[in-house]
Amino acid sequence: MLDVNKIRADFPILQDEAYPGVPLVYLDSAASSQKPLPVIEAMNHYYRHTNANVHRGIHRLSEEATNAYEGARERIARFINAADAAEVIYVRNATEAFNLVAYSWGRANLQPGDEMLITAMEHHANIVPWQILAEQTGAVLRHLPFLPDGRLDLAQLPQLLTEKTRLFSFTAVSNVFGTVNPVKQLIEAAHQVGALAMVDAAQAVPHMPVDVQAWNCDFLAFSGHKMCGPTGIGILYGKRHILEAMPPFMGGGDMIRRVTLEGSTWADLPHKFEAGTPAIAAGIGLGAAVDYLTHLGMENVHAYEQYITNYALEALSEVDNLQILGPSAAQRGGVAAFTIQGLHPHDIAELLDKDGIAIRAGHHCAMPLHQLSGINSTARASFYIHTTTEEVDKLVISLNRAKKIFRL
Amino acid sequence: MDESIYREQIIDLYEHPLNRGHLETADWSYEEDNPLCGDVIRIDVKLDENQRVADVAWSGEGCAISQAAASLLTEEIKGKTLEEVRSFDKDELLELIGVKLSMARVKCALLSLKVLKAGAYGMPDPEEMRKFDNPQ
């Protein structure tokens, strides 16, 4: 098992106090993870020693910057087992990855009456781009419902996923329920009706081994900042032949082969989708994050998260009138969204914060999921490689104290 | 630790809200939500013949801060004129709440005032309305 104390020493922010005399208990990694020192230093080193634009200069610095940035892409490709680094497109975040596919693939391929399928447990990033696309193309957006325990209602899949469906886009792991969806099965089902499959892996890539070739997904999206990397960088993975057939997303420098005032031709993958000077330091930082996680071993990361999540679910179940959303521990990732009768999630988060505990309160960018569950908002604790059982114990103590303040 | 934002009065108001409910006959009703948290507040206002607030009721769901603020605000505006309601300042409400709030929680506190003012401004100006009654 991972040595959690050794890991904690890698994260400078975990050495800080939330308030004087109050240690920080960071249980909001599902919103954005903290950064270990090697990631911070990789970006720092770039700015201090190799800062220059990429893919342009003949000088030493530009060459070093390009090598670091493109080297990171190759390691990220290996991390998700992409067949080729050219299939790994740098974007700002998972949200941009969905928008890229909707804008480029969607506008070129969808006709009125075509259908797209998502699920009712999606993050807004995997809902709104398709709604905009549906409005602009006349395509129809459908959704697969979930069961009361937060698992997808697979019995309804055959009616919803049909030969009309052109794209099935779904999350690998719900950011609220924590549900780990049967990704491979869903992708196979999409392919059987001739649809493309896109996976929201924002809550999967940071937490478990992901192999895009084993999944056989057509597109996959994730964000750097949820996996120990910096903000401002994310990845769109796409199968080469699909990406090659797609028109560019944004026009500008770096994405062209040749420009005349009459017209232009496009650069090869991955640069066709990467107009303008990119987030170079962030790409290098994400490469360092991938190195860090690879060194820990994603199997180990996953096993530790399973352990700490089981511990947390058990501990939270001891709190009276606390309802945890989502399926049993065996089928979930490291998030626990919950409600406490008589205590609003905002008040829970505020009172926990006074004890140095950072959680998220609200709808977690999944309003349809909350509406369908009949609740306005939830409190959410999320766990990562540095979460200790002592921290989970503190969470429970603080929740009980919050209840007491509210005379519950 | 300092838990002053959850002082007794706030918890009391959360448990026993003032002016909670609906008015049978209101001069205006307005409802809005805070998209960040999904909280929603509706306020019904009834004016008397002098255009003063005769009765007011609020309903909705929210955190202790937004709920306490709605109680305090509705209590405060009783008897005030439409103009006074329209010009009611957010700092007055924050002072009534009387606890130091973080930026995020100020939004919770001010949701009821936003709803009240939107309703007050949405209502036609009585002077203007009279002109329609006696066209010249």
Image (cartoon, rainbow, N blue to C red):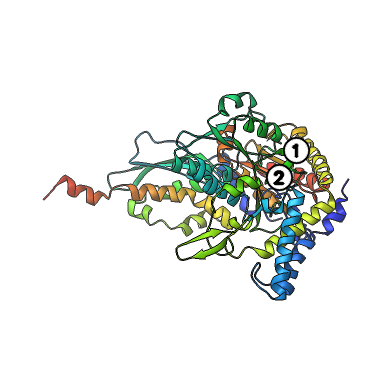
- Tell me what residue is drawn at x 38 percent, y 52 percent: B85
Please indicate, yes or no, whether residue A177 appears anywhere in the rendered image. Answer: yes
Describe residue B53's horizontal placement relative to residue A102 as left or right.
Answer: left
The residues tagged by marks 1 and 2 sit, at their Cα atoms, a distance apart of: 10 Å
Question: Which of label 1 and label 2 is nearer to you?
Answer: 2
Disc 2 packing (10 Å; few <14; some 14–19; many ≥20):
many
Q: Percent position (x, y) of residue A171? A: 65, 39
Please indicate, yes or no, whether residue A400 appears anywhere in the rendered image. Answer: no
Residue, disc 1? A316
Disc 1, disc 2: CB below 8 Å?
yes
Describe residue A249's horizontal placement relative to residue A86 as left or right.
Answer: left
Q: Secondary structure at mark 2?
A: strand
Q: Percent position (x, y) of residue A194? A: 59, 32
- Tell me what residue is drawn at x 72 percent, y 55 percent: B1
Q: Percent position (x, y) of residue A228? A: 74, 55
Image mark for residue A381: 2
Q: Secondary structure at mark 1?
A: helix
- Mark with earlier residue (1, 2): 1
Amino acid type, residue under disc 2 in the picture: Ala
- Residue A138 location, quadrant: top left
- Tell me what residue is drawn at x 66 percent, y 67 percent: A54
